[in-house]
Amino acid sequence: MFIINLLLGASLIFWGRKLFWLFIAAAGFFTGWQLAQIVTHNELVGIIVGIVFAIIGALLAVFLKTIAIGVAGFLMGGSVLLSLAGMIGLDQGMIAWVVYIIGGIGGAILISMFFDWVVVVLSSLGGAALVVGALSLDGPIHALVFIGLFILGIVVQAGEMRKNEKHK
């Protein structure tokens, strides 16, 4: 797993936005691997399940990107607004559905507006976590390398976005 984590982490840090399908595949792999580890405690089963999840994630990212992004934004926006509404008692009955739908529409709009930046930040975070995990660093150096790689990922990918915008 050392080489996989190191290469995948570096790829996400430098090209997470450009290779969106890789970002989703990586998330799928590690989700599948973690779930299999919880259930079976078997490394080989974890890798197989992770690969299956990665393939499914990559295919969804390539063929259903726009739909997947909109659905994710709608679900997250609805859930967040409903949770906030619950703090003031507006999460009961029909009003809960209205709140959820309003939050969902807002979430879908926000994620569509800021999608590139969301992917840049999350791929930089994920890539930094994979690289630091592969290196097995301890103590303060762990946090410093993580923060440095995270910032490097944002700077590199933001620079690439700016360069692409100038060429449009």
Image (tube, rainbow, N blue to C red):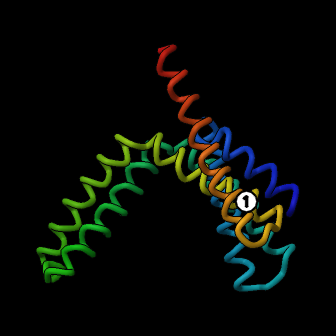
Q: Is mark 1 on a helix, strand or loop?
A: helix
Q: Which residue is rendered at x = 50% and y = 25% of the image?
A: 162
Q: Position of residue 165 (x, y in %)?
A: 47, 21
**Picture quadrant of residue 42:** bottom right
Q: In the rendered view of the protein, which quadrant contains the N terminus?
A: bottom right
Q: In this view, does 52 lie to the left or right of 124?
A: right
Q: Where is residue 2 in the image (x, y as percent from the top left)?
A: 87, 61
Q: Where is residue 9 in the image (x, y as percent from the top left)?
A: 73, 52
**Picture quadrant of residue 28:** bottom right
Residue furthest to the front in view is 140
Name the residue nearer the viewer: 141 or 85: 141
Name the amino acid, label 1: Leu
Q: Is residue 26 left or right of residue 122?
A: right
Q: Which residue is rendered at x = 66% and y = 53% of the image?
A: 25
Can you see residue 31?
Answer: yes
Q: Identify the residue position indicated by label 1 in the image.
A: 130
Q: Which residue is rendered at x = 54% and y = 44% of the image?
A: 120
**Picture quadrant of residue 102:** bottom left
Name the residue nearer the viewer: 121 or 26: 121
